[in-house]
Image (cartoon, rainbow, N blue to C red):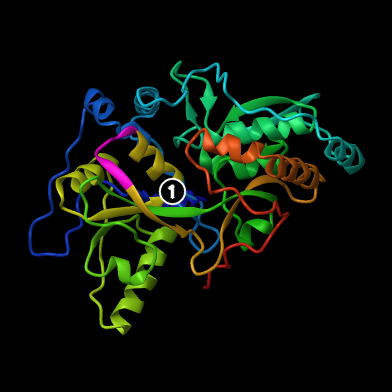
């Protein structure tokens, strides 16, 4: 997840009118009521798209704002996830003396004394979304933010922000850091520093009775109909896989595009498509709250390269190294894995926290 640009806001778990590659007329849009979305658990489909090449930064916002976020929390609560505002099970970390010393030596001063001000979008379960009180931000990125604040000896101060607004917010000093599933790209590294904590992963969402068992390479998608977001990194991967299949004499997959999340989900459940391809956290969450769905296979968001997700700080302000020191302590102690496991994201943690590692390549012009 990492990831896209307001200029390219085609959903990653793409949505709306069916783009059929046939002579049939497109299926009409079907708008569900808030109550229907709640029952179906569609609120959990607030998907964050992966970065395209580098500059693309997209957050697919919930279909109907607060109603959809509340639907996500309600659906999750009904399946054993803690969506309360209290978050009694949130993982905590002791202060990390080395990180505190690095923070003092860096000269960095928090925006609010004694607090770490963290921006997050709050629009994508389970990464960052609204608790069942309708206002408190919770999720895996919020839990990681808590670990960082604890390690630095600071209180956590959360700020909700629109995806398009966080870059300027960090650069202007409105926020100390951003945690909102931001993938490392070479373009972004020109403007920001990153400390990595999760791998960017995509997965395929299918119905429970689908014959698909594992999808992890080009040959596995031959001849399938797959929902994917236009302009996303997922589309880029599938297009490359289709090229490989055609060279190998295999049938390419048919890529299907929607502009409405509920329509995409209905198409999947009705068998009009075989699978959808999107960010692993959102798909895993949806499968957890909807017994009719499951995930099959994981693919790195940077395929054939690696793509990691990082905590974002302003470029060169000295904060990134103390943050990285805390994250590495959380990783080695098992606290990072424990925090991610609360949201079913085990296996996404990095093998080592890195500062400004190689990111997705620059877009060619």
| Magenta segment | 289-294
Left or right, 286 with reference to 112: left
User: Residue 290 colored magenta?
Assistant: yes
Name which residue lies at 37% across and 29% down: 72
Depth check: give the residue in front, 103 or 88.
88
Q: Is residue 245 above or below residue 320?
A: below
Residue 238, image x, y percentages: 36, 66
Left or right, 247 with reference to 254: right
* Residue 124 showing in the rendered view: yes
* Residue 174 showing in the rendered view: no
Residue 112 found in image quarter: top right
Name which residue lies at 25% across and 43% down: 265
User: Residue 1 colored magenta?
Assistant: no
Residue 216, image x, y percentages: 39, 63
Q: Which residue is mark 1?
A: 280
Depth check: give the residue in front, 60 or 293.
293
Name which residue lies at 49% across and 52% down: 5
């Amino acid at each position: 997840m990492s990831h896209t640009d307001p200029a390219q806001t085609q959903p990653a778990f793409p949505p709306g009118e069916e783009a059929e590659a046939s002579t049939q007329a497109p299926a009409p849009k079907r708008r569900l009521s808030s109550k229907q979305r709640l029952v179906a658990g569609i609120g959990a489909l607030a998907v964050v798209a992966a970065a395209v090449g580098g500059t693309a930064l997209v957050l697919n916002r919930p279909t109907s704002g607060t109603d959809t976020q509340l639907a996500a929390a309600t659906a999750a609560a009904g399946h054993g996830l803690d969506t309360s505002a209290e978050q009694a099970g949130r993982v905590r970390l002791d202060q990390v003396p080395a990180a505190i010393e690095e923070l003092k030596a860096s000269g960095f001063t928090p925006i609010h004394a004694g607090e770490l001000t963290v921006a997050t979008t709050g629009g994508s379960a389970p990464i960052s979304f609204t608790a069942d009180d309708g206002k408190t931000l919770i999720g895996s990125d919020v839990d990681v933010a808590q670990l960082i604040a604890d390690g630095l000896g600071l209180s956590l101060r959360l700020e909700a922000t629109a995806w398009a607004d966080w870059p300027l917010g960090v650069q202007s000093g409105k926020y100390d850091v951003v945690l909102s599933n931001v993938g490392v790209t070479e373009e972004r590294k020109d403007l920001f520093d990153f400390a990595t904590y999760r791998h960017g992963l995509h997965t395929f969402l299918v119905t429970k009775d689908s014959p698909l068992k594992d999808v992890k390479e080009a040959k596995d998608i031959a001849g399938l109909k797959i929902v994917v977001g236009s302009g996303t990194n997922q589309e880029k991967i599938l297009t490359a896989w289709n090229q490989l299949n055609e060279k190998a004499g295999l049938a390419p997959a048919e890529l299907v595009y929607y502009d409405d999340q509920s329509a995409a989900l209905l198409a999947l459940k009705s068998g009009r498509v075989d699978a959808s391809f999107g960010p692993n956290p959102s798909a895993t969450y949806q499968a957890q709250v909807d017994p009719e769905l499951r995930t099959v296979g994981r693919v790195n968001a940077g395929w054939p390269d690696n793509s990691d997700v990082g905590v974002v700080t302003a470029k060169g302000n000295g904060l990134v190294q103390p943050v990285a020191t805390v994250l590495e302590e959380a990783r080695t102690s098992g606290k990072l894995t424990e925090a991610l496991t609360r949201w079913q994201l085990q296996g996404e943690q990095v093998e080592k926290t890195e500062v400004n590692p190689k990111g997705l390549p620059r877009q060619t012009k």
